[in-house]
Amino acid sequence: MAARMSFPGGDPVAARRALAFALAEYLDTGGVREAVLLWAQHFEGQGSLFVGLSRYCRQIAERFGLAGREAELHLKIFRALQADPQQLPEDPLSLPPSDGLTTTPAWLDPRPAEAAAVPSSGPAATVQAGAGARTLQAFFAAVEEQLARDTPPGLTPARLRRTLIRHAPSLPRPQQQAASLWWSGQVGSLGGEWPAGGHGTTLVNVIYVTLAELVGPARADRCFTLAVQRLTATRDATLAEIRRYL
């Protein structure tokens, strides 16, 4: 199932619904509404979700007495972003105030006007057949190389790939099979078409969720950031397309 995340060009309402679903395990109705409002006012549409979500989880943990559970919150939210939309609740901000927060808390300052006016990057363009696979292969290689430089004890390439295959059911069946064959080493390259904003973005999400589970969200963020920087620094336009997948 493709993740409904607030990446540039993504669906912010779907992201808020996923946040409400994940946070309902920790907060009451009013708390969920406050937490989602915090996201909408300070994080929504403000660049890479990978970086923003870590800061968001730290703030939620601080505000709601969940210190020490930041990584757990992070992973719960990512799993909610991959859930079937029919399982998600309504966007809390679309409900009447009587159903949740009646007033905006003082700690939720309105978003500055200049931030709200930042133009959207628009829907991610679909890359040509084959180009998406090449970009994702290069990105995954950069991720593996970064992990090799900063690998926690017990994390081997084989364990990483086994965990990726375990998370592969997040993809539609044909893409799941192609990714699993590639990660298992049964084929040397990733088959099929992997457009940004579609299956390709979902594959990146699977990689991130796997890393967050194995090494924690902070190290996963660092690994992603450095891998993206490495590809965008190249003169190869196909590899630099990786930002369209985030």
Image (spheres, helix red, strand yellow):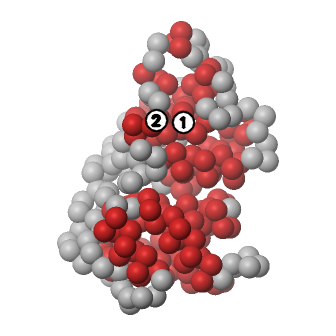
**Residue under circle 1?**
21
Residue 105 position by quadrant: top right
Q: Earlier in the sequence, mark 2 or mark 1?
A: 1
Q: Residue at x 60, y 28 (%)?
A: 32
Q: Residue at x 56, y 55 (%)?
A: 51
Q: Position of residue 225 (x, y in %)?
A: 54, 67
Rate crowding at label 1 as few (under 14), some (14 to 19) or many (20 or more) other CA atoms within 10 Å: many
Instruction: Give amino acid for label 1.
Output: Phe
User: In front: 151, or 193?
Assistant: 193
Q: Secondary structure at mark 2?
A: loop
**Residue under circle 2?**
88
Q: Secondary structure at mark 1?
A: helix
Is residue 114 visible in the rendered image? The answer is no
Q: Residue at x 66, y 67 (%)?
A: 214
**Left/right of residue 226 with respect to residue 71 in the rendered view:** left
Instruction: Give amino acid for label 2.
Output: Leu
The Cα–Cα distance between marks 2 and 1, rounded to whole angstroms, is 6 Å
Count of all numbered marks drawn on residues in the image: 2
Q: Position of residue 246 (x, y in %)?
A: 42, 59
Q: Position of residue 215 (x, y in %)?
A: 68, 67
The quadrant of the picture occupied by the N terminus is bottom left
